[in-house]
Each structure stands twice: as C-alpha cells, then as structure tokens.
Amino acid sequence: MGLPNREDGNIITLKRRFILNEELPDEEWDRWADAKSFLREIVETIVLTLIIYGLVSLGFRNFRVIQTSMEPNFHDGQYLVVNKLTYRLHPPERGDVIIFHPPTNPEKEYIKRVIGLPDETVEIREGYVYVDGRRLEESYIAQVNRHGSWGPSVVGQDEYFVLGDNRNNSSDSRTWGMLPRENIVGKAWLSYWPPQEWGLVPHYTFVSG
C-alpha cells in the first residue's frame, strides 16, 4: 500500500471542510463564538470579583455594634465598615471612632472614640474631659455625668485614651487604662445598616474650652 500523495491530502482536507460546513453553518459557528465569548466574560468577571474581594478583605471588614456604649451616635445592631489600612498611613486622631481589642479582654472587640493622644495629660472633672488642662467641647455627647471624675493621667507612648459616647454606660479607659496602639483593629469608616443610618462616620473637630 503506497503513501498518499499531495493531491489525495487536498481531497481529504476538502472533504473535511465540506462535512464541517454541512454540520455547522456560518450562523451556527457565530452562535458558538458568541457562547464562547459569553463564557469567557463570565470567567473573567468571577476572577476579577475574587481578586477585588481579596483586596477588600485585606483592607476592610464589617463590625456589628453591640450594646449601647456609643449611644446616641451608634446603636445596638448597627453595622459598620472598618478601614484597617488608615492607621498604616497615619496615627489615630482625636475624635476617631475605632474598633480594638481591649487589654483586659483581647478576644473581644470594642468600639470607642479616641480622646487622649500620646504624651497628653487627661483628666475628667464633673463629667467634662480636660486634655492638657483645656476642656473639650464634645457636641456628640447626649448627657454629661456631672458626678464623674477621673485622673489626671498621662497617656504613654503608642497609647490612647478612649471613651464611649455614652459615658454612663461604657467600659473604657476609665476602667482598664490606656489602649496600646497595637490593639487597634481599624477606624470606623462607613455605616451601612440599618438603611436609615447609611453614610460615612462623621469626624468631629474639637474646640477646647
């Protein structure tokens, strides 16, 4: 039996093309091409979504407010987005609402407001907070406990003095002392649930009295 020559090969190729053209007309090839393109877009979308989710999970996370220590500004059951990258760029500022692990209960997470910064002297007299001898005007406080006193005490290096907005019902630096910076998880950035609380977490500018 001899080897097929070039002419035989061309005939076979033409026959294959003819058969394929009979089985898959142009419009059917177009449908297959559209389906392949659609599937490729789905795969690309899934991959992109996973990449974005991974990046977001590295820099952000959610947090559920528990109990009432941050009333009237944050409520039990409210959900927040926490920015974990902010304090890699700059230190916490006075007025920031932060999520952290309390020194006395590190497996839990608390939400409080930064009041005293490193090297500052903090004191509470008749419910009012004094930083380096100047009284802070805290517009976000619903009620001042005129019987509350604490300090004075100096905030250490890489430490912060934090308080709950609801001063009458909050476990904070008055109870367990200064908060080490390494215990901070991140900054409360956005409220997303319930819907009526949707919006960026406001940052207050303090005026010293």
Image (cartoon, rainbow, N blue to C red):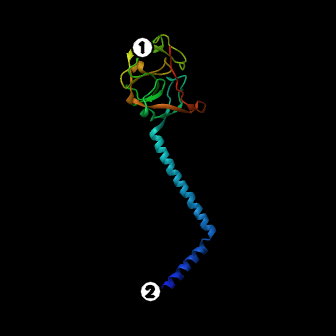
**Amino acid type at image mark 1:** Trp
Residue at x-position 45% and y-position 33%: 86
Going by the picture, which residue comes out furthest to the left? Answer: 157
Going by the picture, which residue comes out furthest to the bottom? Answer: 1
Q: Seen in the image, is 22 located left or right of residue 185?
A: right
Q: Is the residue 18 above or below the residue 172 in the image?
A: below
Going by the picture, which residue comes out furthest to the right? Answer: 27
Q: Is the residue 82 above or below the residue 35 in the image?
A: above
Residue at x-position 56% and y-position 76%: 17
Residue situated in front as seen by the camera: 106 or 202:
202
Residue at x-position 39% and y-position 28%: 181
Q: Is the residue 57 above or below the residue 118 in the image?
A: below
**Amino acid type at image mark 2:** Leu
- Residue indicated by mark 1: 150
Tell us which disc is closer to us: 2 or 1. 2
Among numbered discs 2 and 1, the one appearing first in the sequence: 2
Q: Is the residue 46 above or below the residue 8 in the image?
A: above
Q: Position of residue 158 (x, y in %)?
A: 37, 26
Tell me if mark 2 has few (under 14), some (14-19) or many (20+) residues whose alpha carbon lies within 10 angstroms of its own: few
Q: Position of residue 184 (x, y in %)?
A: 41, 30
Q: Position of residue 209 (x, y in %)?
A: 50, 13
- Could you tell me which secondary element the residue under label 2 belongs to? loop
